[in-house]
Amino acid sequence: MRLGAPIFDEYTGPEEWVAAVQRQGFRAAYCPVGNDQPQDVIRAYERAAADADIVIAEVGAWSNPMSPDPGAAAQALAHCQAQLALADEIGARCCVNIAGSRGEKWDGPDAADLTDDTFDMIVESVRKIIDAVQPKRTYYTLETMPWMYPDSADSYLALIDAVGRERFAAHFDPVNLINSPERYFHNAALLHECFDKLGPYMQSCHAKDALMSQDFLVHISEVRPGVGTFDYRVLLAGLARLDPDLPVMLEHLPAEEYPAAVAYVRSVAAEIGVKV
Protein backbone atom coordinates (compact mmCIF):
# COMPACT_ATOMS: atom_id res chain seq x y z
CA MET A 1 0.00 0.00 0.00
CA ARG A 2 1.31 3.44 -0.97
CA LEU A 3 0.28 6.76 0.52
CA GLY A 4 -0.07 9.91 -1.58
CA ALA A 5 -1.70 13.34 -1.63
CA PRO A 6 -1.82 16.46 -3.80
CA ILE A 7 1.52 18.22 -4.30
CA PHE A 8 1.40 21.97 -3.76
CA ASP A 9 5.03 22.73 -4.62
CA GLU A 10 5.57 24.22 -8.06
CA TYR A 11 7.57 22.16 -10.52
CA THR A 12 8.70 22.66 -14.11
CA GLY A 13 9.79 19.16 -15.02
CA PRO A 14 9.94 15.52 -13.95
CA GLU A 15 12.95 15.89 -11.66
CA GLU A 16 11.40 18.75 -9.70
CA TRP A 17 8.11 16.84 -9.46
CA VAL A 18 9.86 13.72 -8.13
CA ALA A 19 11.72 15.83 -5.58
CA ALA A 20 8.43 17.41 -4.42
CA VAL A 21 6.79 14.01 -3.99
CA GLN A 22 9.78 12.61 -2.14
CA ARG A 23 9.96 15.60 0.21
CA GLN A 24 6.56 14.53 1.51
CA GLY A 25 7.68 10.93 1.85
CA PHE A 26 5.01 9.72 -0.57
CA ARG A 27 5.31 6.60 -2.69
CA ALA A 28 2.22 7.39 -4.79
CA ALA A 29 1.07 10.54 -6.56
CA TYR A 30 -1.68 12.02 -8.66
CA CYS A 31 -0.92 12.41 -12.36
CA PRO A 32 1.45 15.39 -12.72
CA VAL A 33 0.59 16.44 -16.31
CA GLY A 34 -2.43 17.06 -18.50
CA ASN A 35 -3.43 15.38 -21.75
CA ASP A 36 -2.36 18.50 -23.67
CA GLN A 37 1.31 17.73 -23.10
CA PRO A 38 3.52 16.28 -25.87
CA GLN A 39 4.12 12.54 -25.80
CA ASP A 40 7.81 12.97 -24.97
CA VAL A 41 6.94 15.05 -21.88
CA ILE A 42 4.41 12.46 -20.72
CA ARG A 43 6.93 9.69 -21.22
CA ALA A 44 9.58 11.67 -19.32
CA TYR A 45 7.30 11.83 -16.29
CA GLU A 46 6.56 8.14 -16.64
CA ARG A 47 10.28 7.30 -16.60
CA ALA A 48 10.97 9.63 -13.70
CA ALA A 49 8.20 8.05 -11.63
CA ALA A 50 9.44 4.54 -12.37
CA ASP A 51 13.07 5.44 -11.57
CA ALA A 52 11.99 6.99 -8.24
CA ASP A 53 9.63 4.10 -7.36
CA ILE A 54 6.59 6.40 -7.39
CA VAL A 55 3.27 4.92 -8.49
CA ILE A 56 1.07 7.30 -10.47
CA ALA A 57 -2.22 6.43 -8.85
CA GLU A 58 -4.83 7.98 -11.07
CA VAL A 59 -5.75 10.42 -13.79
CA GLY A 60 -8.95 12.30 -13.03
CA ALA A 61 -11.59 12.58 -15.76
CA TRP A 62 -14.01 14.65 -13.69
CA SER A 63 -16.98 15.41 -15.96
CA ASN A 64 -20.59 14.38 -16.56
CA PRO A 65 -21.27 11.90 -19.38
CA MET A 66 -24.83 11.64 -18.01
CA SER A 67 -25.56 15.35 -18.47
CA PRO A 68 -29.09 16.17 -19.69
CA ASP A 69 -27.41 18.61 -22.11
CA PRO A 70 -26.39 16.50 -25.15
CA GLY A 71 -23.49 18.81 -25.99
CA ALA A 72 -22.12 18.72 -22.46
CA ALA A 73 -22.49 14.95 -22.34
CA ALA A 74 -20.58 14.55 -25.61
CA GLN A 75 -17.86 16.88 -24.40
CA ALA A 76 -17.56 14.90 -21.16
CA LEU A 77 -17.33 11.61 -23.05
CA ALA A 78 -14.50 12.99 -25.18
CA HIS A 79 -12.73 14.28 -22.07
CA CYS A 80 -12.94 10.84 -20.43
CA GLN A 81 -11.48 9.24 -23.54
CA ALA A 82 -8.60 11.73 -23.63
CA GLN A 83 -7.87 11.25 -19.93
CA LEU A 84 -7.97 7.47 -20.26
CA ALA A 85 -5.48 7.72 -23.11
CA LEU A 86 -3.24 9.87 -20.89
CA ALA A 87 -3.48 7.32 -18.07
CA ASP A 88 -2.43 4.56 -20.43
CA GLU A 89 0.41 6.64 -21.84
CA ILE A 90 1.86 7.65 -18.48
CA GLY A 91 1.31 4.24 -16.84
CA ALA A 92 -1.19 5.35 -14.19
CA ARG A 93 -3.03 2.61 -12.37
CA CYS A 94 -6.38 4.01 -13.44
CA CYS A 95 -8.39 6.82 -14.95
CA VAL A 96 -11.22 7.78 -12.61
CA ASN A 97 -14.49 9.64 -12.96
CA ILE A 98 -17.88 9.44 -11.33
CA ALA A 99 -20.71 7.97 -13.37
CA GLY A 100 -22.31 11.42 -13.58
CA SER A 101 -25.74 12.79 -12.77
CA ARG A 102 -28.79 13.34 -14.91
CA GLY A 103 -29.63 16.40 -12.82
CA GLU A 104 -28.43 19.98 -12.87
CA LYS A 105 -25.31 19.42 -10.72
CA TRP A 106 -22.77 17.13 -12.34
CA ASP A 107 -21.96 15.30 -9.11
CA GLY A 108 -25.19 15.97 -7.23
CA PRO A 109 -28.19 13.78 -6.47
CA ASP A 110 -31.14 13.46 -8.82
CA ALA A 111 -34.22 11.25 -8.71
CA ALA A 112 -33.27 9.70 -12.06
CA ASP A 113 -29.76 8.62 -11.06
CA LEU A 114 -30.60 5.38 -9.24
CA THR A 115 -32.80 3.88 -11.96
CA ASP A 116 -32.50 1.01 -14.41
CA ASP A 117 -32.43 3.45 -17.34
CA THR A 118 -29.47 5.33 -15.87
CA PHE A 119 -27.68 2.08 -15.08
CA ASP A 120 -27.95 1.16 -18.77
CA MET A 121 -26.73 4.63 -19.79
CA ILE A 122 -23.68 4.25 -17.54
CA VAL A 123 -22.87 0.88 -19.10
CA GLU A 124 -23.09 2.40 -22.57
CA SER A 125 -20.89 5.39 -21.71
CA VAL A 126 -18.21 3.27 -20.04
CA ARG A 127 -18.08 0.97 -23.07
CA LYS A 128 -17.72 3.96 -25.40
CA ILE A 129 -14.85 5.35 -23.34
CA ILE A 130 -12.93 2.08 -23.11
CA ASP A 131 -13.60 0.93 -26.66
CA ALA A 132 -12.42 4.25 -28.15
CA VAL A 133 -9.08 4.08 -26.33
CA GLN A 134 -8.40 0.33 -26.04
CA PRO A 135 -6.05 0.80 -23.03
CA LYS A 136 -3.36 -1.80 -22.55
CA ARG A 137 -1.85 -0.84 -19.19
CA THR A 138 -4.43 1.12 -17.23
CA TYR A 139 -8.10 0.81 -16.28
CA TYR A 140 -11.14 3.03 -16.51
CA THR A 141 -12.88 3.25 -13.14
CA LEU A 142 -15.88 4.88 -11.50
CA GLU A 143 -15.58 6.32 -8.03
CA THR A 144 -18.06 4.92 -5.51
CA MET A 145 -20.67 7.53 -4.61
CA PRO A 146 -23.46 8.08 -2.04
CA TRP A 147 -26.30 8.84 -4.47
CA MET A 148 -25.40 7.47 -7.88
CA TYR A 149 -24.13 4.15 -9.21
CA PRO A 150 -21.93 2.54 -8.07
CA ASP A 151 -23.32 3.14 -4.56
CA SER A 152 -22.47 -0.28 -3.10
CA ALA A 153 -20.25 -3.27 -3.67
CA ASP A 154 -23.15 -5.12 -5.29
CA SER A 155 -24.02 -2.31 -7.71
CA TYR A 156 -20.34 -2.06 -8.66
CA LEU A 157 -20.18 -5.79 -9.37
CA ALA A 158 -23.35 -5.47 -11.44
CA LEU A 159 -21.75 -2.69 -13.49
CA ILE A 160 -18.54 -4.65 -14.00
CA ASP A 161 -20.56 -7.62 -15.23
CA ALA A 162 -22.79 -5.51 -17.48
CA VAL A 163 -19.96 -3.45 -19.01
CA GLY A 164 -18.08 -6.63 -19.86
CA ARG A 165 -14.72 -5.00 -20.54
CA GLU A 166 -11.45 -6.30 -19.11
CA ARG A 167 -10.15 -2.77 -18.63
CA PHE A 168 -13.04 -1.65 -16.44
CA ALA A 169 -12.12 -1.86 -12.76
CA ALA A 170 -12.98 -0.29 -9.40
CA HIS A 171 -11.99 2.95 -7.72
CA PHE A 172 -12.71 2.76 -4.00
CA ASP A 173 -13.84 5.79 -2.03
CA PRO A 174 -15.29 4.15 1.09
CA VAL A 175 -16.30 7.39 2.81
CA ASN A 176 -18.50 8.23 -0.18
CA LEU A 177 -20.50 5.11 0.65
CA ILE A 178 -21.35 6.37 4.15
CA ASN A 179 -24.84 7.58 3.25
CA SER A 180 -26.89 6.29 6.18
CA PRO A 181 -26.61 5.90 9.98
CA GLU A 182 -26.32 2.14 9.52
CA ARG A 183 -23.29 2.46 7.27
CA TYR A 184 -21.85 5.22 9.46
CA PHE A 185 -21.97 3.23 12.69
CA HIS A 186 -21.05 -0.08 11.06
CA ASN A 187 -18.44 1.14 8.58
CA ALA A 188 -16.07 -1.70 9.47
CA ALA A 189 -18.62 -4.23 8.24
CA LEU A 190 -19.07 -2.19 5.07
CA LEU A 191 -15.32 -2.22 4.50
CA HIS A 192 -15.10 -5.98 4.93
CA GLU A 193 -17.93 -6.46 2.43
CA CYS A 194 -16.23 -4.21 -0.12
CA PHE A 195 -12.88 -5.95 0.28
CA ASP A 196 -14.50 -9.35 -0.13
CA LYS A 197 -16.46 -8.37 -3.25
CA LEU A 198 -14.42 -5.63 -4.92
CA GLY A 199 -10.89 -6.39 -3.71
CA PRO A 200 -9.70 -8.03 -6.94
CA TYR A 201 -10.86 -5.01 -8.96
CA MET A 202 -9.57 -2.11 -6.81
CA GLN A 203 -6.95 0.07 -8.49
CA SER A 204 -6.86 3.14 -6.23
CA CYS A 205 -8.47 4.39 -3.03
CA HIS A 206 -9.34 7.82 -1.64
CA ALA A 207 -8.71 8.42 2.06
CA LYS A 208 -11.08 10.68 3.98
CA ASP A 209 -13.21 10.47 7.12
CA ALA A 210 -16.87 10.92 8.09
CA LEU A 211 -18.51 12.66 11.02
CA MET A 212 -22.23 12.67 11.82
CA SER A 213 -23.62 15.76 13.55
CA GLN A 214 -26.40 15.91 16.11
CA ASP A 215 -28.56 17.94 13.73
CA PHE A 216 -31.94 16.67 12.64
CA LEU A 217 -32.40 14.96 10.17
CA VAL A 218 -29.21 13.07 9.16
CA HIS A 219 -26.10 15.14 8.43
CA ILE A 220 -22.85 13.33 7.64
CA SER A 221 -19.87 15.51 6.80
CA GLU A 222 -16.61 14.69 5.05
CA VAL A 223 -13.67 15.50 7.34
CA ARG A 224 -9.96 14.81 7.40
CA PRO A 225 -8.73 11.40 8.52
CA GLY A 226 -8.62 11.13 12.29
CA VAL A 227 -11.36 13.67 12.97
CA GLY A 228 -14.27 11.36 12.22
CA THR A 229 -15.24 7.82 13.20
CA PHE A 230 -14.08 5.85 10.17
CA ASP A 231 -12.26 2.65 11.11
CA TYR A 232 -8.83 3.26 9.61
CA ARG A 233 -7.38 0.13 11.17
CA VAL A 234 -9.78 -2.02 9.18
CA LEU A 235 -9.33 0.13 6.08
CA LEU A 236 -5.53 0.08 5.99
CA ALA A 237 -5.21 -3.56 7.00
CA GLY A 238 -7.70 -4.60 4.33
CA LEU A 239 -6.03 -2.55 1.59
CA ALA A 240 -2.58 -3.87 2.54
CA ARG A 241 -3.79 -7.43 2.08
CA LEU A 242 -5.01 -6.71 -1.44
CA ASP A 243 -1.96 -5.28 -3.18
CA PRO A 244 1.32 -3.87 -1.81
CA ASP A 245 1.28 -1.16 -4.50
CA LEU A 246 -2.35 -0.07 -4.06
CA PRO A 247 -2.39 3.75 -3.77
CA VAL A 248 -4.21 5.40 -0.88
CA MET A 249 -4.72 9.03 -1.86
CA LEU A 250 -5.70 11.87 0.46
CA GLU A 251 -7.97 14.54 -1.05
CA HIS A 252 -10.46 17.39 -0.50
CA LEU A 253 -8.50 19.20 2.21
CA PRO A 254 -7.11 22.70 2.59
CA ALA A 255 -3.35 22.61 2.08
CA GLU A 256 -2.68 23.31 5.75
CA GLU A 257 -4.65 20.22 6.86
CA TYR A 258 -2.73 17.63 4.86
CA PRO A 259 0.18 17.26 7.31
CA ALA A 260 -2.19 16.25 10.12
CA ALA A 261 -4.04 13.86 7.83
CA VAL A 262 -0.80 12.28 6.64
CA ALA A 263 0.46 11.95 10.21
CA TYR A 264 -2.75 10.23 11.30
CA VAL A 265 -2.73 7.70 8.47
CA ARG A 266 0.92 6.92 9.07
CA SER A 267 0.36 6.53 12.80
CA VAL A 268 -2.44 4.00 12.27
CA ALA A 269 -0.37 2.16 9.68
CA ALA A 270 2.57 1.93 12.08
CA GLU A 271 0.28 0.73 14.85
CA ILE A 272 -0.96 -2.20 12.77
CA GLY A 273 2.36 -2.91 11.05
CA VAL A 274 1.44 -1.76 7.55
CA LYS A 275 3.97 -0.05 5.28
CA VAL A 276 2.70 3.07 3.54
Image (cartoon, grey):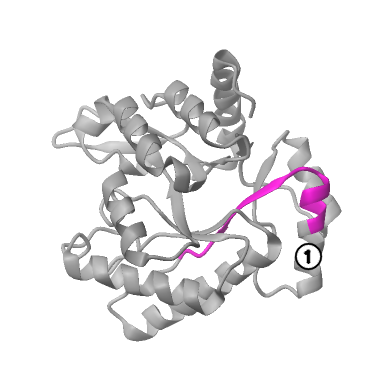
Instruction: Name the residue at 51% across, 41% down.
Output: 253
Left or right: 227, with 242 as reference point:
left
- The range drawn in magenta is 47-62
Which amino acid type corresponds to the residue marked 1 in the rendered image? Arg
Above or below, 123 relative to 241: below
Image quadrant containing the C terminus: top right
Q: Secondary structure at mark 1?
A: helix
Q: In the image, is 79 to the left or to the right of 143? A: right
| Residue 152 visible here | no
Residue 252, percent from left and from top: 49, 45
How many numbered dots are placed on residues in this image?
1
Q: Position of residue 168 (x, y in %)?
A: 46, 61
Residue lying farthest bottom? 71
The residue closer to the viewer here, 222 or 195, is 195
Task: Give the camera-side residue of 59 and 229.
Answer: 59
Inspect this view and state whether residue 78 appears.
yes
In the picture of the structure, the residue carrying the numbered disc 1 is: 43
Q: Quadrant of residue 232?
A: top left
In the image, residue 235 lies at what x, y percent? 45, 29
Residue 49 magenta-drawn? yes
Q: Determine the image quadrant of residue 75.
A: bottom left
Q: Is residue 260 left or right of residue 232?
A: right
- Figure quadrant of residue 38: bottom right
Residue at 27 percent across and 69 percent down: it is 104
The residue shown at (79%, 68%) is 41
In the image, residue 239 lies in the stretch drawn in magenta: no
User: Residue at image x 41%, y 82%?
Assistant: 74
Q: Residues within 10 Å of mark 1 (few under 14, many from 20)?
A: some
Compared with residue 150, is residue 271 higher up or lower down, i.e. above or below? above
Q: Position of residue 18 (x, y in %)?
A: 79, 47
